[in-house]
Amino acid sequence: MPTYARFDLAFERGEGPYLFTADGRRYLDFAAGIAVNALGHAHPHLVAALQAQSEKLWHCSNLYQIPDGIRLAERLVAASFADQAFFCNSGAEAVEGAMKLVRRYHFAKGQPERTRIITCRDAFHGRTMTALSAADNAKHLEGLGAVSPGFDHVPYGNMNELRAAITAETGAILVEPIQGEGGIHSADPAYLQALRQVCDEFDLLLIFDEVQCGMGRTGKLFAYEWAGVAPDVMALAKGLGGGFPLGAFLASEKAAAGMTPGSHGSTFGGNPLAMAVGNAVLDVMLAPGFLDQVQATAKTLRQELSTLVTRHPRVLAELRGTGLMLGLKCVVPNGDLVKRLSENQLLTVGAADNVVRLLPPLIIEDAQLREAVEIIDGVCRDWPQNTA
């Protein structure tokens, strides 16, 4: 179906931070499959894990124990605020599961009316009807008719309007610590801390959507760690599988109290192939020094990009983001910049608010950072005068 405005590009293989076309052209990948290929392409440890598991067992369903799934859940719990994990296949499913958990939590407490969730404008939570309704983006909802009920939308970062939106039917607050599709807007730590306080005050569940900003992207395993607060529920995907379809939502024991046998499920979620790869991803990300290196690399990239913003005010207006989740707010149309960068063999991805996202794999090295910066610098320097 013609649902994608695809580039006239096809890739045959990938290696580390690079993608290669069939005719041998090499592209530096600062899109990373939209923050999915967190460890680059064809990472040897991930390849070995997938190959080994593929020779043993692909699928058996959740009717039976899946030992690697138990191991992955235990490792995610040990590295986070959570006590329990549910595995699914995508970020949208993770968010949907988190929203179901909210209703089950209040139902189990004898308050079934508490089904509404406060969400933020300019958010993105996935492409299912409920996830789209949570985000309330007119562009994504065009032609889809009635939205799913149960959401109250407030400006990102505005605690006064959020407090005013709380009613007797409110059950949770859902936010992204960094809005990705919305334009790389990073939440102030004080905002996330205030959300935690208001949830405790009104017995609301706090859900963080870390589908894009989680799994090492900010230099810590989870973005919420920078604010020193913990959610009750967290949605993960993208980098969790390093390119293999894998999502999860994690929850505290208190928040998950309403989840009982039959209350949720997934045919493919948590299958042995996905669990093998998820554990392999954690092997790399939890290795000593890995996240420290991400932070150091991110600092270097931020410094270089800040210089470019100052140097090219006709093209670039602002640098946004945290860690290796960065955005260049553009003066020129962001789609034009994405296209010109691609023509110079640097892959990036657009976002709302006229932003170009830079989402390199977390294994990126300084030499490749310099390569990317030189391409951006050259494209901005040669930008036609009459298009600025």
Image (cartoon, rainbow, N blue to C red):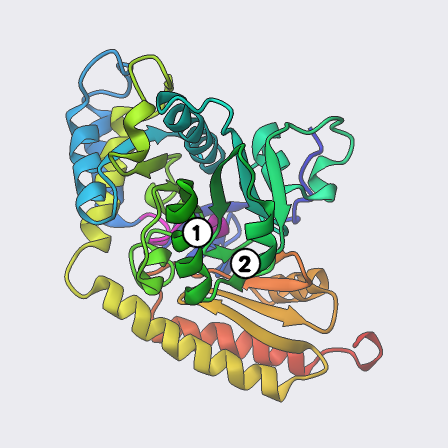
332 in the magenta segment:
no
**Is 11 above or below relative to 86?**
below
Q: Nearer the viewer, residue 367 or 78?
A: 78
| Residue 50 in picture, x, y percent from top left | 25, 35
**Is 63 above or below relative to 378?**
above
> Is there a contact, CB below 8 Å, between mark 2 and mark 1?
yes
Question: How far apart in space, not on screen, are marks 2 and 1 (Cα)?
Answer: 9 Å
| Residue 365 in picture, x, y percent from top left | 33, 70
38 in the magenta segment:
yes
> Which residues are drawn in magenta?
33-42
Q: Nearer the viewer, residue 153 or 239?
A: 153
Which residue bears the numbered disc 2?
A: 159
Looking at the rendered structure, the kind of residue marked 1 is Val
Q: Nearer the viewer, residue 329 or 9?
A: 329
Q: Nearer the viewer, residue 201 or 179?
A: 201
Query: Toward which corner of the image does residue 104 lie, by quadrant?
Result: top left
Q: Is the residue marked by circle 2 packed among few (<14), some (14-19), or many (20+) residues within 10 Å? A: some
Which residue bears the numbered disc 1?
A: 198
Inspect this view and state whether residue 128 appears. no
Residue at the spot 45% in from the left edge and 82% down from the top edge: 303
| Residue 86 in picture, x, y percent from top left | 31, 30
Q: Is the residue marked by circle 1 packed among few (<14), some (14-19), or many (20+) residues within 10 Å? A: some
| Residue 54 in picture, x, y percent from top left | 25, 26
Residue at the spot 34% in from the left edge and 60% down from the top edge: 362
Which secondary structure dominates the residues rendered in magenta? Answer: loop
Which numbered disc flags the more N-terminal residue, 2 or 1? 2
Count the labels in the image.
2
Residue at the spot 46% in from the left edge and 30% down from the top edge: 93
